[in-house]
Image (cartoon, rainbow, N blue to C red):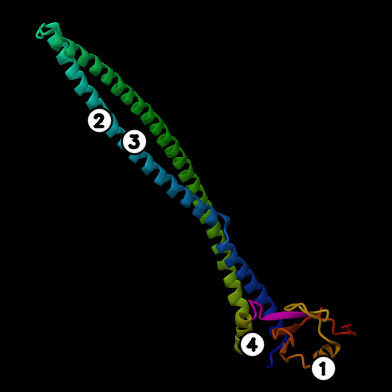
Amino acid sequence: MKAEPVHQVRLLDLQEIDAALDRLKHRARTIPEIAEVKELDVRIVALRDQVAVAETALRDLDREQRKAESDVDQVRVRSDRDARRLETGQVSSPKELEGLQSEIVSLQRRQAELEEIVLDVMERQELAQARRADIEKELVALTAEREAAEDRRSEAILEIRADADSTNQRRERVAAEIPEDLRALYLKLREQQGGVGAAALRYGRCEGCKLALSTAELSQIRSAPADEVLRCEDCRRILVRTNESGLSGPVQE
């Protein structure tokens, strides 16, 4: 393939621009806030699950409290009824009187036990409410932290897009100066060679694969026409001659 030396050198400019675009794509994929937002999302979901668990526990405790208070009321009603019977003298039989007094004592003891249960439930309710409040407070803080991280992510993306737009415009101008067949070969090699389709020959070394050329290879390059498109024998990338190629004198292997 033939191409004017100026067009070959322009390939290096195009390669540099494409490398810059690749770096911008990498930056866009690896913005720290992307991972931060994902991590915060996981933590927020976990906290919301904890809030749901806490609310379920509170509902269960509410039912338990109502049940315990209902049991207390039932025992109190029975105890009050027996106490009125005792006070009004409705019971005259000594045996029945003894039984009624015993039942009142038993009911009072049962009422005290149930009231302890109510107090225990209320204490557990307070703890559960405090736990839910702590989780909700942490959830609010994490949500705010996520919003801030998302804002930073959006700003970074906008900055990268702006850089990419200006770089793409510069690429279009440079690419337009390169013959289509040379550009097509460059793009093909760039796809095959990990993003680098053209490399400078600098001081007897291919900047693509970083390998030094042999004396015989350099001799062939020296004798090649200026418009001949050269390829590195090792990596097969387009090899572009420059003022720094080291072709003016002997080069050691």
- Residue 59 placement (x, y as % from top left): 30, 37
- Residue 29 placement (x, y as % from top left): 55, 63
Q: Which residues are magenta?
A: 193-201
Image depth: mark 4 or mark 3 in front? 3
Badge 2 amino acid = Lys
Q: Which mark is residue 223?
A: 1
Q: CA distance from mark 1 to mark 3?
A: 88 Å
Q: Which residue is mark 2?
A: 67
Q: Which mark is residue 58?
A: 3
Q: CA distance from mark 2 to mark 3?
A: 14 Å
Quick check: 33 above or below 243? above
Does label 2 or label 3 sit earlier along the sequence?
Answer: 3
Image quadrant where residue 85 sits: top left
- Judged from the image, the secondary structure of the residue bearing numbered disc 4 is helix
Does label 2 or label 4 sit earlier along the sequence?
Answer: 2
Badge 1 amino acid = Ser
